[in-house]
Amino acid sequence: MRVTGLILAMSMLASCTEGGFGDFSSFGDPASTVADTASRGDYFPNDQLIVTAKTQFQNGHYGKAHTSSKRAVEVASNDPQALLIYAASLDRLRRFDQADVAYRKLQPIIGNRIEFHNNYGYSQLLRGNLQLARKHFLIAYEMDPANETVANNLELLRNSSTYQRRSRGDLQGI
């Protein structure tokens, strides 16, 4: 009797989904409708992936920003905006080894620009490399002293130098 009831319940559940009993997803749709079917060769007529990545990054969703920016880099591997947001999201996820690869690829593309020095300086700040962070922030500041983001990062660096977990040896030369 229990077996018959169990079989009846399973068949009712299976008839409620399009793809059968094993086609469930956490969104209530069939798994096939939420699967990522895009390939590396897909064409994106606009900056949809970059816009999504920037929005996710600004909202503090660094994992989602990483996913979107990674796709943008796969589609256009030499796009400076895609590489910048990709490296920044990796920094926030503390994947510095992968971020370094993106920064090495980015530097020859955009050259000596404020965006590069500011982002790379912030990356070094997150790692605790205060001297290198200061060097890059100052380069960006010399390019545009009125840049509010660079000024804020220099202030953040100044405040980081008094953070109680740093040893005196880390602060020499700042």
Image (cartoon, rainbow, N blue to C red):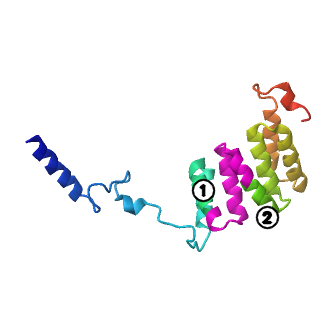
Q: Nearer the viewer, residue 171 or 105?
A: 105
For disc 2, the marked residue is: 109
SS type, badge 2: helix
In this rendering, would 61 be left or right of 109? Answer: left
For marks 2 and 1, give the one nearer the viewer: 2
- Residue at the extreme left of the image, as rendered: 1
For disc 1, the marked residue is: 55
Disc 2 to disc 1, how far (Cα)?
Answer: 24 Å
Q: Which residue is rendered at x = 76% and y = 25% of the image?
A: 164
Residue 60 % position (x, y): 60, 47
Name the image quarter holding the C terminus: top right
Name the image quarter holding the N terminus: top left
**Does 76 lie within the magenta span?**
yes
Q: Which residue is rendered at x = 78% and y = 43% of the image?
A: 124
One can see residue 149 in this view = no
The stretch in magenta equals 73-101
Residue 19: give its label. Answer: none
**Does 173 lie within the magenta span?**
no
One can see residue 139 in this view = yes
In this rendering, would 159 be left or right of 61? Answer: right
Q: Which residue is rendered at x = 90% and y = 31% of the image?
A: 172
Residue 114 % position (x, y): 82, 56
Give the class, few, some or many, for how many residues have Cα within 10 Å of label 1's Cα (few <14, many ≥20).
some
In this rendering, would 63 be left or right of 80? Answer: left
Residue 65 % position (x, y): 60, 53
Contact flag, marks 2 and 1 (Cβ < 8 Å): no
SS type, badge 1: helix
**Residue 129 found in image quarter:** top right
- What amino acid type is highlighted by mark number 2? Ile
- What amino acid type is highlighted by mark number 1? Thr
Q: Earlier along the polypeptide chain: callout 2 or callout 1?
A: 1
